[in-house]
Each structure stands twice: as C-alpha cells, then as structure tokens.
Amino acid sequence: MSEDTARLELPNGPYDVDLLESTVGLPGLDIRKLRAESRVITFDPGFANTAIAKSSITYVDGAAGELRHRGYSIEEIAKNSSFLELAYLLLYGALPNAVELSEWENDISHHMMLNEEMRSFFDAFPRRAHPMAVLSSATNAISTFYDVYRRPTRKKEIDAGARTLIAKLPTIAAWAYKKSIGEPYMYPNDEYSYVESFLHMMFSRPTQEKRIDPAIVKALNVLLILHADHEMNCSTATVRSVGSSRANMFTSVAAGMGALWGPLHGGANQAVIEMLQAIHDDPDATIASTLERAKDKNDEFRLMGFGHRVYTNYDPRAKILASYAEDVLAATAGSDPLLDIARDLEAAALEDDYFVERKLFPNVDFYSGVIFRALGFPQRMFTVLFTIGRLPGWIAHWMEMNTDPDTRIMRPRQIYIGEPARAYVPLDQR
C-alpha cells in the first residue's frame, strides 16, 4: 500500500482506495469502484461526508471561518467588488479587467428586458402566489423564447444562456412582486446599474420615480455578493444533480430554486425575522428566557440564525453583514427594534457555555433578514433576493459540471430495510 492509498478493513477482507488530494482542505477517498469490487456501499445521509465533485469555484473552511471564491477572500470581494464583478469571477475563473467588466455590465444591462409576451404569464398567477413559485416557473418559461440556449452545445451558447438568466432574473423578481401587490410592472432602465435597475423596478411607479440611495445600492450589492455561492450546499447540489442528467441550464437552476425555498436553506432569513418579531411582541419574553427555551429539548422553539452545517466558527458573511447593519439603518429607517434584539441575542449567546461549547455562532441568515427589511423588502421577497444572489454560483457549478469528464448522472444508493422476498397473495385470499 502506497502513501497515496488508504486501506479499509471490510468483512470480506481489506480493500485499498486511492487518496484524492486537494489544493487546500481535506483530501478524499476515491470509492467509485468500492461497490463493484467489494460488494459494500457507504451510508451517508445528506451526503454530509461525501464529495460529489471536484470543484475550483468556492472553498469553505468551517473551522477557521473562511470563505473564498476562486482563491479570493469574501472580505476582500465584499469590500472592493460589485456583484456583477463577482458573477464574472465565478463563471470565468478570473477577475475581469476594466474593459471586460464594462462590456459584461453593459451586456447584462441591455438584456434585462423580458419578452412582452411574458406579461400574460405573470397575469395568469393569482395575486397571493408566492414570488418564489413565480420565479422558478418563469425561469423555465423564459427558456422557451431562447430555444438554442435550452440545448447548448457550444461555449458561445452557454455564455449567452448564463447572461440571459443573470440579466432577466431581477426583472422576473420585480414583476412577481408587483403582481403580488397589484401595481403596474416597471421596465428596467439601461442607464442604471444592475442593482439600481432592480430597485427601480421594485419600488418605482409609473407616476413616481423612486430615489435610489447610493448607500442602499452598496448594501444590496454586498448582500448579493454574500449569497453568491457557498460550495456544495443543498440547492447547488440540486442544480448539479438535475444537470447531471444533461438537463439544460434553465431547468437545472429552476430546480435549485425549489431547494433554496425550503425553511432550512434559503428561507431561514425569513424565519429569523419571524422569531425576532415574536420575541418583540411577547411582553414576557426576555433575552435570557429566549436562550433558555432554545436549550430546552422539550420546547419546540428554535433559535433561528445560529449554527451552520459547515461553520464551527463565526460565519464570515455574518460578520460582514453585522458591520453593515448600522449603516443601512442610518440610510433608511434610522433604527429597528429587531436589530437591537438580534444584537442582544448574539451577545448573550456568545457568553453562554451551551452555545460556545456547541460552536453555535450567528450565520448569514441572522442579519440578512434585518437588512433586507430595512431596505424596504417584504418578507416574501427575502428568499427571492437570496436567489438573485445565488444564481451566478449555480450557473458556475452547472458549467463546471458539464466540462468535467468525471461527471456521471447522479444516482445515490440505498440500504434496503424493507420486507424480504415473499409470495404474492391473490386478492380473494387476503
């Protein structure tokens, strides 16, 4: 056995597997031939300890609290880049120069308009329809206007499909919101930046142009950046799983939206706001009693926004958002009692042995909902905003997967625990 292999002691004898090295982070055990050669499979619910791909897009070190995209730290990106600049980095592997960035931004800006026939699509939904349902449906629908992008075979077609999705998703999101409140749809404005155009479509009316505060534009840029990609999470794995069947980019991304919608994933920031609001509205609730409820295994209450599947340290995205919260509130409402409760909860939890020992630190959802709320977005739009941010990451993974020679259609195994073989009983004998 060499240094590049590991030995598994199995009931039917030892089995050697190759070690796959990473540039940083944990190495992997290559068990692709394990079932065929040893007649044994691994059991790993939720793929918590299983790598489904080799990727060069995003690296997360949960113990150190680090997040990097293509090697660049999230702190540097959030401080220096726009969301579209990060999108370019995720898709193409390098930061754009000034000319490339200008061309990319102009290209996106001039493709934000939806085909006018899409109006009837939005009109067909009831006003009570959740914007996420409209968003995922519309993502598949717009592909019907660009048939060549649905079956891309060349890089040029893939690039055009990526641009189309990134450009049009804010328009879809804004129209879904306008539909839900019964207001006229607003068109994108080529004179605005990506984020400015989205804010314009969300909050302007035909009778009144919404003033766009640069501080709010900067804050939303940062929020989108912090949600852009996070390695092999539930929704990204879903995009890859659907895409592994050679499903097109639009369909794969729409599937990812469904996964993101879940309250344990993208819907968590809304759950944080609902929790903070409940604490605020309960005259008997205190910070101390809230933490005690969270520690009580017999209490159904959960302290939302704390802990993370990957991070056993402070989520670096939460640190960045916490520093932006005061600036955003200063540029908008000026104060928010829910932010005060959030800060008090964080301070108390970080001094509590129960949370410290279990490494339960605030995650990105803990502050994002408060900031989305301060920016004027209703709770039903929180996961939609997360989706706009996460889109470039999904596309980058879909593109990477389709160029990886190791990609195979996703087909997990199972350990069967049902009935063994038994004789069929005719209906008249049962």
Image: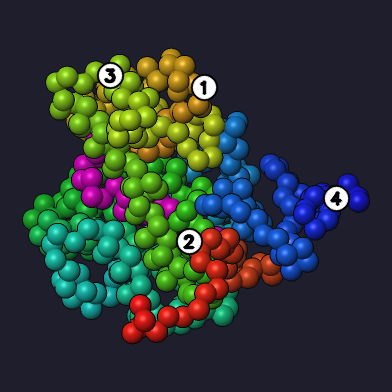
Q: Mark 2–mark 3 contact, CB under 8 Å? A: no
**Disc 3 on helix, strand or loop?**
helix
Q: Mark 3–mark 4 contact, CB under 8 Å? A: no
Marks 4/1: CA distance? 35 Å
**Disc 2 on helix, strand or loop?**
helix
Marks 2/3: CA distance? 38 Å
Q: Give the numbered dot on residue 174.
A: none
Marks 1/3: CA distance? 19 Å
User: In the depicted view, which residue is nearer to us: 241 or 379?
Assistant: 241
**Does the rendering let one see residue 59?**
yes
Q: Position of residue 373 (x, y in %)?
A: 24, 39
Looking at marks 2 and 1 on the same chain, the residue that comes earlier in the sequence is marked by 2
User: In the depicted view, which residue is nearer to us: 415 or 86?
Assistant: 415
Q: Residues within 10 Å of mark 4 (few under 14, many from 20)?
A: few
x 48%, y 43%: residue: 81
Q: Give the numbered dot on residue 238.
A: 2
Marks 4/2: CA distance? 31 Å
Which kind of residue does numbered mark 2 sit on?
Answer: Thr
Q: Which residue is mark 1?
A: 357
**Does the rendering let one see residue 84?**
no
* Quarter of the figure that contains the C terminus: bottom left
Q: Give the numbered dot on residue 4.
A: 4
Question: Which-is-in-front pick, marks 3 and 4?
Answer: 3
Please indicate whether residue 107 sits to the left or right of residue 9 in the image.
Answer: left
Marks 2/1: CA distance? 32 Å
Q: Residues within 10 Å of mark 1 (few under 14, many from 20)?
A: few
From what the image shows, is residue 325 above or below residue 29?
above
x 80%, y 50%: residue: 9
Q: Which residue is mark 3?
A: 289
Looking at marks 1 and 3 on the same chain, the residue that comes earlier in the sequence is marked by 3
What stretch of residues is rendered in magenta? 373-397
Q: Mark 1–mark 3 contact, CB under 8 Å? A: no
